[in-house]
Image (cartoon, rainbow, N blue to C red):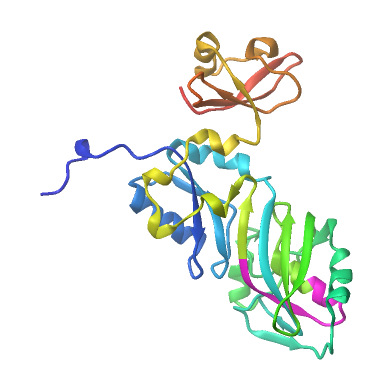
Amino acid sequence: MAERRADRLPPPDGIAVVDKAAGWTSHDVVAKSRGILGTRKIGHAGTLDPSATGVLVLGVGRATRLLRYLGDLPKTYVGEMVLGTETNTLDADGEVTATHDMGPIDLATVQSAAERFVGPIMQVPPMVSAIQIDGRRLHELAREGIEVERAPRPVTIHRLVVEPTDVPHVFRLDVECSSGTYIRTLAADIGTALGGGAHLRNLRRTAIGQFTLATAVPLDSLSADAVQPPAVAVAHLSPVTVDAEVEAAVRVGKVLPLDVLGVEGGGPWAVLAATGGLLAVYVAHNPGTAKPDLVLSG
């Protein structure tokens, strides 16, 4: 006999960190997670290419609304840059479009070229990407053999470490960067700077902000027990814990004086109940007041 809905536990609310396997799209992970956790209210922050592995942050239940606060968190990746071969996707999944005889290249030479890309840079997104131009995603156009001009976008490379591997012309990249950075493009641009070309392989995301592989679980191990409380999604925001009287005002989304809310500065603030549960995210409003940007509990 089918299990009655009343006998089931309610679906969880919170954040889950999945260690995505190669061959899965980010959408595939979300679809599978919906079945595992028993809710359709699941979204993700920070798309990973199908061939890439590593940290994929899921918002579950009401916490899907918190994913927007993760968009600007820095991301960390490791991958391998293969010098001498260019592909149409800038990674190992694509078709080879050019080869270069780059001769012997030592680590110091590669490191020197890579240093030019540390800090704020302008980066042209690859054609095979989810970016939309005139209402169509670039990867859809690429499948039709159409290439369009892409405007360079500002990104920041916070840290770029180049290490040797046991394979000639293959170097390991360890990158911490701003959201919106394409590591495939970074590898290709370093190859060009060295007088040839390159593509990326074995990309793995090791962190999105405070979310790391240390707390990530393989998709086949995902369960309600792996879903962390919603408050972890905004742990990077300034926290404030309120008493019962202020909590009641927060729950109905009242604009509050900063001193009543118990905050100062420019925000935003993660507003917590005495129990530690996340109530809302408040932002600066008129001088001396704060308003809700999102009320999670009401």
**At which x and y percent is residue 216?**
51, 53
69 falls in the magenta region: no
Residue 195 falls inside the magenta stretch:
yes
Quadrant location of residue 51?
bottom right
The spot of residue 160 in percent (x, y) is 78, 61
Q: Is residue 42 above or below residue 126?
A: above
Q: Which residue is at the front of the view, 225 or 13?
A: 225
The image shows residue 298, relative to residue 215, as above or below, that is above
Q: Nearer the viewer, residue 130 or 224?
A: 224
Image quarter for residue 184?
Answer: bottom right
> Where does residue 38 sit, x and y in percent of width and height?
33, 46
What residue sits 34% from the left and 52% below the top?
36
Q: Is residue 94 visible?
A: yes
Res 105 → quadrant: bottom right
**Residue 133 visible in the picture:** no
Q: Residue at x 87, y 64 (%)?
A: 115
Q: Which range of residues does the magenta coloring cover? A: 189-203
Locate residue 33, reporting x and y percent.
40, 53
